[in-house]
Image (spheres, rainbow, N blue to C red):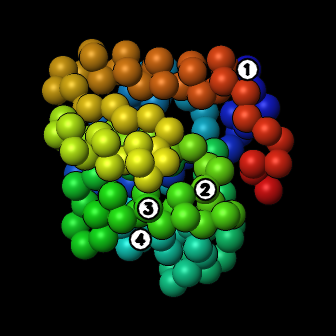
């Protein structure tokens, strides 16, 4: 297993139902990383830039991976992705879009902006669990990231 497994996740998800499903699945899969949640794009950017309620870096540690919904209130996921990938300090953090949007334009725009992966949320809970398990196995077991990623 990769050495970054103690690093937290940032889950940017406005739906309480989806967030609680993610939490249950993480527990079932024995995922031990801390999970931080932001409910909209503005809060996610505050978390990443240590602004507002997240000015204390202990409240907002650098995430090992960002799971990002696209359809968020206010600043949407496309804009959050663009800002992350244009910032030299943040652009190295893997961003996985986890969304209900299967629109080919959304997929194309996200990859043009530098998303690391695009996953369409399945409605079936078992498929969702399998997708999350595959995601975790890939990013934290099969994949190797440079040590300097998580300063």
- Horizontal side of 71 relative to 109 (left or right) equals left
- Counting residues from the start of the chain, the first of labels 4 and 3 encountered is 4
- Residue under the point 27% across and 17% down: 127
From the image, state whether disc 2 or disc 4 is nearer to you: 2
- Counting residues from the start of the chain, the first of labels 1 and 4 encountered is 1
Which secondary structure, mark 3? helix
Which secondary structure, mark 4? helix
Q: Is residue 36 above or below residue 32?
A: below
Instruction: Tell me how far mark 3 sits from mark 2, CA to CA.
Output: 9 Å
Disc marking residue 82: 3
Q: Residues within 10 Å of mark 1 (few under 14, many from 20)?
A: few
Expressed as whole percent of the image width and height from the top left, the position of residue 120 reads 27, 32
Expressed as whole percent of the image width and height from the top left, the position of residue 121 reads 25, 32
Q: Is residue 147 above or below residue 62?
A: above
Determine if residue 90 is in view. Answer: yes
Instruction: Tell me how far mark 1 sits from mark 4, CA to CA.
Output: 31 Å
Instruction: Tell me how far mark 1 sits from mark 2, CA to CA.
Output: 23 Å
- Horizontal side of 140 relative to 80 (left or right) equals right
Disc marking residue 10: none
Assess whether mark 4 and mark 1 are in contact (beta carbons under 8 angstroms): no
Q: Which residue is mark 4?
A: 43
Q: Which residue is mark 2?
A: 91
Q: Which residue is mark 1?
A: 1
- Counting residues from the start of the chain, the first of labels 3 and 1 encountered is 1
Q: Quadrant of the C terminus?
A: bottom right
- Horizontal side of 49 relative to 115 (left or right) equals right
- Counting residues from the start of the chain, the first of labels 3 and 2 encountered is 3
Q: Nearer the viewer, residue 45 or 16?
A: 45
Q: Is residue 55 above or below residue 112?
A: below
């Amino acid at each position: 297993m990769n050495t970054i497994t103690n690093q937290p996740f940032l889950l940017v998800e406005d739906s309480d139902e989806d967030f609680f499903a993610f939490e249950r699945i993480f527990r079932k899969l024995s995922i031990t990383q801390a999970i931080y949640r932001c409910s909209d794009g503005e809060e996610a950017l505050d978390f990443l830039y240590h602004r507002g309620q997240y000015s204390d870096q202990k409240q907002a540690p650098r995430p090992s991976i960002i799971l990002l919904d696209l359809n968020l209130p206010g600043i949407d996921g496309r804009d959050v992705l663009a800002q992350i990938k244009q910032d030299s300090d943040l652009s190295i953090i893997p961003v996985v879009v986890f969304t209900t949007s299967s629109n080919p334009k959304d997929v194309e725009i996200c990859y043009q902006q530098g998303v690391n992966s695009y996953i369409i949320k399945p409605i079936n809970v078992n498929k969702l669990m399998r997708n999350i398990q595959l995601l975790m196995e890939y990013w934290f077991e099969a994949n190797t990231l440079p040590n300097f990623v998580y300063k």
